[in-house]
Image (spheres, helix red, strand yellow):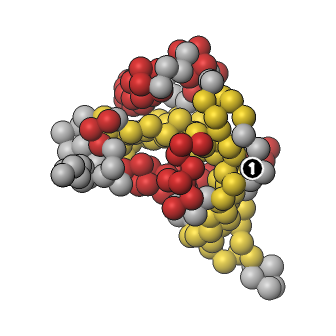
Amino acid sequence: MTQMPTPQEPGTMRYALGDADDPVSQEIKDLCLGIRLEVFVGEQHVPFEEEVDLLDEAGSTLHILATDAEGNPLGTARLLQDPDHLGQVHLGRLAVVKEARGTGLGARLVREVETMALVGGSVPITDSFGQPTGEGEVTVILSAQEQAMGFYSKLGYEVVSGESYLDAGIPHQDMARVVRGPVR
């Protein structure tokens, strides 16, 4: 009988903007990149030059790092926001280290991206009188590896066109979900 992984509650979620160059932000970005290199380059054989791109350093990019209680890196995600396209963001580079898979951490990272997207990239929802309700709406788009589409479907994401394409030699499809909620 296969033993299920023990849930690992992250000690914290930490954040860094792509263009931040202070020591704390740089450490977060380095740890996020380390996870991505381990998962995508090491395990999935994605070429390094395809994994790392200029968006990593963009001021509108938010890197999210999940760590355990001791500060060990467990997972990461990248939120791309475009100020010219308010109400639409891109979730990418979601990776969880092998030891933390199956614990729910990936879903927690997706929900964290959605929360941060509402804060920084949503459009306000108004009532029938045009008054803001204090809530926002944002469409989160992602490029899902086909083998991970079931994971995203369980989180409410739907296939956009059904068109399969190769990214780094791996079959992908675009998926999206509209997220609504309070804007903090």
Residue 36, above or below 181: above
Residue 91: x and y in percent read 59, 44
View extreme (bottom): residue: 128
Relative to residue 168, is residue 30 drawn left or right?
left
Q: Is residue 89 visible?
A: no
Tell me which corner region of the image, top left, top right, bottom left or bottom right, holds residue 68: top left
Relative to residue 1, is residue 180 drawn left or right?
right
> Which residue appears at 57% of the width and 27% of the height?
56
**Left or right of 21 in this view: 53:** right
82 vs 135: above or below:
above
Give the image location of residue 90, x and y in percent.
65, 44
Residue type, mark 1 in image? Gly
Q: Nearer the viewer, residue 132 or 76?
A: 76
Image point (57%, 58%), residue name: 153
- Residue at 71% from the left image edge and 67% from the top image edge: 124
**Tally of numbered tags:** 1
User: Residue 50's quadrant in the figure?
Assistant: top right
Residue 119 lies left or right of residue 160; in this view the side is left
Using the image as rendered, state which of residue 11 and residue 48 is in the foreground: 48
Q: Residues within 10 Å of mark 1 (few under 14, many from 20)?
A: few
Q: Position of residue 31 (x, y in %)?
A: 37, 27
Give the residue at mark 1: 162
Q: Position of residue 49 (x, y in %)?
A: 59, 14
